Image (cartoon, rainbow, N blue to C red):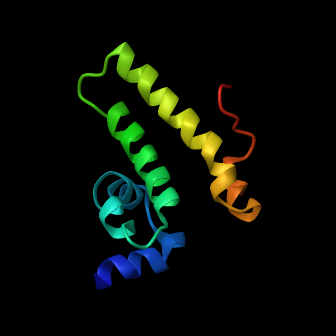
Amino acid sequence: MKQINTVLSHHDFIIGAEYRSFLLYWGAIVLRGILDEDRYLHFLLLCSAITLFLGLSITEDDVRLGEEMIYIYLRMYPHLYSKRRRHFLGGMQPGH
């Protein structure tokens, strides 16, 4: 747990592979009980969409489902997080 806390407290220095591991493998475990239920489910929605897109065999239905999950994620974001925390989305708008 000490290693996880260290990684989380130094997020400015995390490389892409560590973000990927957090998103795909241990983020859901670490964030359970830390985030409130709405934000936790929001995080799981993103994890599920990314996991779907990374499948070895992905169908057109998988792509449509994954896209819808991402659009839902983006639509929910402004309602869950302050304006200060939304800067990284830039001009991204669902459906564009």
In the displayed structure, 21 sits above or below 70; it is below
Where residue 83 sits in the image (x, y, percent)? 76, 60
- Say how many tags the image has: 0
The percent coordinates of residue 42 (x first, y second) are 49, 51
The reply, left or right, for residue 35 in relation to residue 52 is right
Name which residue lies at 38% across and 81% down.
5
Q: Is residue 19 left or right of residue 80?
A: left
Q: Residue 37: where, in percent of width, then height?
A: 46, 61
- The residue at the far top in this view is 60
- Residue 36 at what x, y percent from top left? 49, 66
Farthest residue in the left direction? 56
Q: Residue at x 64, y 40 (%)?
A: 75
Q: Quadrant of residue 57?
A: top left
**In the image, is 71 to the left or to the right of 20?**
right
Above or below, comparing residue 57 to residue 54 in the picture = above
In the image, 8 versus 35, the foreground residue is 35
Q: Residue at x 39, y 47 (%)?
A: 47
Q: Residue at x 74, y 64 (%)?
A: 84
Q: Quadrant of the C terminus?
A: top right
Residue at the front extreme, as displayed: 37
**Where does the N terminus fall, quadrant-wise?**
bottom left
